[in-house]
Amino acid sequence: MVTIHPLISPWGRFGLYSFYIDAPEPAIVDTGIASSPSDGMAPALEALGRRIEDVRWILLTHGHIDHVGGARALWELTGRQAKVVIHEADAHLLRSRRAHVQQYVDVRQQYLHDPEGVEKQTRTADGAISGEMEPSVLVRGGETLSLGGDVTVSVHAIPGHTAGSVAYVVDGQDDVFVGDAVQVHGAANGFPGYEDPRAYRASLEHLRDVRPRHLYLGHPYRTADGVPYGVELDRDQARQALQGSLDVEARVADAASRYLRDGVRETDSPYSPFARVAEELGYTGDPTLEPSPFFTTLHGYKELHDHG
Ligand SMILES: [Zn+2]
């Protein structure tokens, strides 16, 4: 059995979570932002009697800024020894700061109408990403990575939150790292965020079949009452979180499809053009607060409706 330790770094209203896999070739799952490796991970590892320079694997669950931002800095701290792993569909987000701004321009900008939006996104990408880099290992799902001794990790493709989201499963002990692929009711913004609703649902069903013994999440996601789950769920909590995520997706899908059938309407509401969906779902959070999961997710349903 290999031991897993959560490593926490603060970022504004969010706590950023990485996980240390204490294998012969130690691994860190997700890297927070630029400052996280030196300010959050290094002291936390030292307290465990481990050294950040000994880390040999950097396993990225997906390309979002708060997961890949610290990758370059962490890789440098390992003397460039660690292998950096990411799914090929999210690799551009590791290679390029501009790709994060482009993602905003392609989807959220058309709903947020913020004249300074691009400037703000550029500033965030510059500050939160420690450096652009080429991944060492590109995965698509189905690979097995050897962390030394008899410790292996399987890669499962679980697209939906992003196209290149993956789960890392520690073989033989069913510890599963999913990043942001299990959203329940969403994190701080109170709405679940996923780019591709159909893929998101299929990935949740896949994870349910994996039956995680422990499920490790990228953020403390919320229950229906707004109470945050921890980021380390046991088997029962994992089952609940997966079923809960499927139930929430079904509700959002139902509200979105009825509304989209009638045609979207621009209004003065901050939820425009999806004001009726927010109303029906009882969503009262601020939809403009980045990363704006409300617009990312409803844009996904609109794409499905418009293009099948
Ligand atoms: Zn994410």
Image: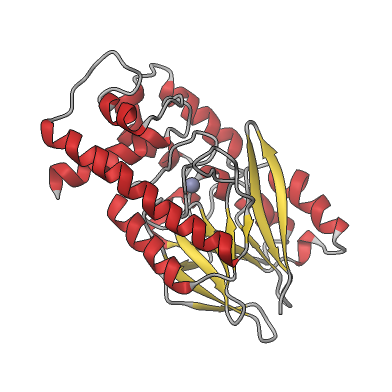
Write down the quadrant of residue 21 in the picture.
Answer: bottom right
Q: Residue furthest top?
A: 268
Closest to the observer: 201 or 153? Answer: 201
Closest to the observer: 122 or 45? Answer: 45
Tell me if I can see residue 61 in this picture: no
Relative to 61, is 14 above or below? above
Horizontal side, residue 114 vs residue 137: left or right: left
Tell me if I can see residue 154 in this picture: yes
Horizontal side, residue 141 vs residue 53: left or right: left
* Identity of the residue drawn at 35% across and 33% down: 281
* Identity of the residue drawn at 42% across and 54% down: 90
Horizontal side, residue 255 vs residue 158: left or right: left
Relative to 14, is 209 above or below? below
Q: Residue furthest left?
A: 262
- Give the image location of residue 308, x and y in percent: 14, 50
- Give the image location of residue 4, x and y in percent: 71, 66
- Give the image location of residue 127, x and y in percent: 60, 34
